[in-house]
Amino acid sequence: MFPDLPPFAGPTATVENALLELGRIGGIMDAQDDMTRTPLDLITDPALNVGNPNNPTHTAGTTFMGQFMDHDMTRDASSRLAIPTPPEETENLRTPAFDLDSVYGGGPLVSPQLYDDNWRFRVDTMGDGGYEDLPRNDDGSAILGDPRNDENAVIAGLHAAFLMFHNRVMDDLAARNRRIPAINFTQARLITTWHYQWIALHEILPQFVGQAVIDDVRRNGRRFYRPRGQAYIPVEFQTGAYRFGHSMVRPSYRLNMAGDGGAPFVAFIFSPDATGDDPDDLRGGRGMRRFVGWQTFFDFGVDPFTGQLEAKPNKRIDRKLSTPLFMLPAGTLPAPGGPISLAQRNLLRHLTWQLPSGQSVARAMGLPVLSAADLDELQPLGGDLQDSTPLWYYTLAEAEVMEDGLRLGPVGARIVAEVILGLLELDGASFVRIQPSWRPTLPAKYSGRGEFRMVDFLAYAGVDPASRGQ
């Protein structure tokens, strides 16, 4: 997006060491969660949440929808950390569009392992209630369009919900007109994709950037993400601004209401001590307790059985990451080697792509610039990072300083809004391009006529709490 701006720093030992220090466990970015306490303690005890303040404008599922959207538009499997690489030389293994290629793969003819004989998705079950799961091999590995969607139990459950949603559309189409499966499949994919795009545009993106930024981009056009030909994923988005979602991850979650011997299953997102076929954390893979109770993650209203609002809030966007993200399990890393701290990996990618500083991007955009005083915690690290800050860290600091962590600040919001809107506008098959006035056509159980949110998506897929009798 900004090819004429210089890198934030050179790939020197001083700079690399400063980035490693910034992103290390126990360092400046570590929320210092007390991992000796139980996962439930970290959810319910306010004294333990100092490093992970609540965001009252998001529920916990927003994080994972952001991750799902990321996996649908970009995948880099070849670049090396801290080794300068021209972005144009690195292949994106996903199509740069919200077209669900991470779910559909190449379709039934190219990716037959994902489908049954009727062009419906294969779906497995787990737990005593027959909860949906990804189809799996005998060793427990998932069979899916993008292996990253089994990184944790929540993203795996979300992917499985998309499989269920498509299958429900297929069933409804077959019941109405009895067309052959190939014809129904094409229509079902379009219906599923457009409802997903609607949610991304009208529910998720406003939570990330604020509606005012979206309205400005749609009214006045994109100023910085303006591909001359086909759409692409800018590194300032992929490595810089969009990785803000890592700051929203909580150390632990209540995954479901009855997976632990009839009691709620609460676990760390990742734990270095978790082992076995059904580990005590939320890493991906097979496990009888690891189905998702979506009332924790999205707002279905007051639960009729408990009389309480069961949805849990997200964490604010700030300069802190939850402690488990500094100890990633080997299975979540794209390749052996390199640090296991997610923060260190994100920061070293700024050297890979030679990204500009947050300050220089802000100036190029004509937006307010954080002062060195706003970033004075970086001064002791060396490398002049307080004056020329890696774009990802700058995005987090800007959200914290300028928006109280509720949404992205000016630079981060503009990059994210322009790219996501641009991908929809440049996609010749999206509803934004083909039929801008389109509105969701499927039943909105919770939102009402003409609207459609994630709770309605999950209800139509048959995985909402009411459908399960919860």
Image (spheres, grey):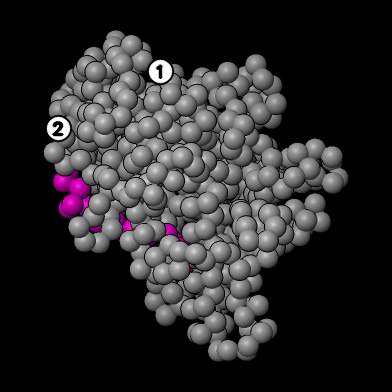
Magenta-drawn stretch, dominant element (helix, strand or loop)? loop
Residue on which disc 2 sits: 6
Discs 1/2, front: 2
- Quadrant in the picture for the N terminus: top left
* Image quadrant where residue 48 sits: top right
Task: Give the percent coordinates (x, y) of residue 247.
Answer: 47, 32
Instruction: Report the front residue among 65 and 373.
Output: 373
As drawn, 100 above or below 59: below
Task: Give the percent coordinates (x, y) of residue 113.
Answer: 47, 73
- Which residues are drawn in magenta? 85-104
Do labels 1 and 2 touch, CB within 8 Å? no
Kindly report the distance in space between the C-alpha atoms of the residues bearing marks 1 and 2. 26 Å
As drawn, 25 above or below 354: above
Q: Amino acid at mark 1?
A: Ile
Q: Residue at x 34, y 33 (%)?
A: 411
Q: Is residue 99 magenta?
A: yes
Residue 437 visible here: yes
Q: Secondary structure at mark 1?
A: loop
Q: Is residue 309 magenta?
A: no
Say the numbered circle drawn on residue 28. Answer: 1
Q: Residues within 10 Å of mark 1 (few under 14, many from 20)?
A: some
Q: Secondary structure at mark 2?
A: loop
> How many badges with numbers are in the image?
2
Q: Amino acid at mark 2?
A: Pro
Q: Residue at x 58, y 48 (%)?
A: 154
Q: Residue at x 22, y 52 (%)?
A: 90
